[in-house]
């Protein structure tokens, strides 16, 4: 019989595997919400993929804030994602990270009302920006990589601000 610690670790590793399997080249969202960190997280092995490592860093930076939408994927010449859940009226924060030596041009906001282009250098940087939303808004972003995204990965999260 498994101990509580091993059971928790097995459940967490299964969740990580499902998240990794859900990410595909067409960038469908891996999850519309992330589970709150547990004490077993410290016992888990580090993610082995670049996207998994970025997701773990972003989750750590978010602390106890639970994303209303998040995901990961490989850097490509062009990629995007729309969160199926609608946020509450107010403000949401868009956080984005990418690995590699390249850069991306980001547009983010609500469907039909995206920001002007923001150039963002990949590496250890975190892009964060607040967006005012109405209750029926649909959150979205799109990005292009001038280098074609031949190497690297990305992770993003949308968090409702209080």
Image: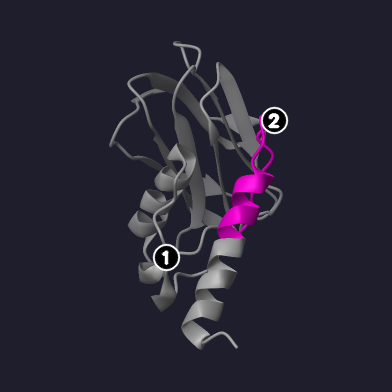
C-alpha separation, residue under disc 1 versus residue under disc 2: 29 Å
What is the quadrant of residue 99 in the picture?
top left
Q: Residues within 10 Å of mark 1 (few under 14, many from 20)?
A: few
Q: Can residue 152 be seen by looking at this rendering?
A: yes
Q: Can residue 134 be seen by looking at this rendering?
A: no
- Residue 13, image x and y in percent? 55, 63
- Residue 47, image x and y in percent? 44, 51
Q: Identify the image quadrant of the N terminus.
A: bottom right
- Residue at image coords 47%, 46%: 52
| Secondary structure at numbered mark 1 | loop
- Residue 12, image x and y in percent? 54, 67
State yes or no: residue 72 in magenta. Answer: no
Q: Identify the image quadrant of the C terminus.
A: bottom left
The residue pinned by badge 1 equals 44
Q: In screen coordinates, is 142 left or right of 105?
A: right
The residue pinned by badge 2 equals 26
Magenta segment boundaries in residue numbering:
15-33
């Amino acid at each position: 019989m498994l101990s509580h610690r091993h059971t928790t670790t097995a459940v967490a590793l299964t969740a990580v595997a499902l998240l990794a399997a859900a990410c595909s080249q067409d960038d469908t969202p891996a999850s519309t919400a992330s589970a709150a960190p547990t004490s077993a997280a410290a016992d888990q092995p580090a993610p082995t993929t670049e996207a998994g490592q970025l997701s773990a860093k972003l989750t750590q930076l978010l602390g106890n804030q639970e994303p209303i939408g998040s995901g990961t994927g490989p850097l490509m010449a062009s990629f995007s994602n729309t969160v199926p859940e609608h946020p509450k009226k107010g403000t949401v924060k868009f956080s984005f990270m990418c690995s590699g030596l390249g850069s991306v041009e980001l547009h983010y906001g609500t469907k039909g009302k995206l920001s002007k282009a923001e150039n963002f250098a990949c590496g250890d940087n975190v892009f964060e920006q607040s967006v005012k939303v109405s209750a029926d808004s649909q959150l979205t972003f799109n990005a292009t990589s001038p280098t074609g995204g031949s190497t690297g990965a990305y992770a993003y999260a949308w968090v409702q601000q209080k």
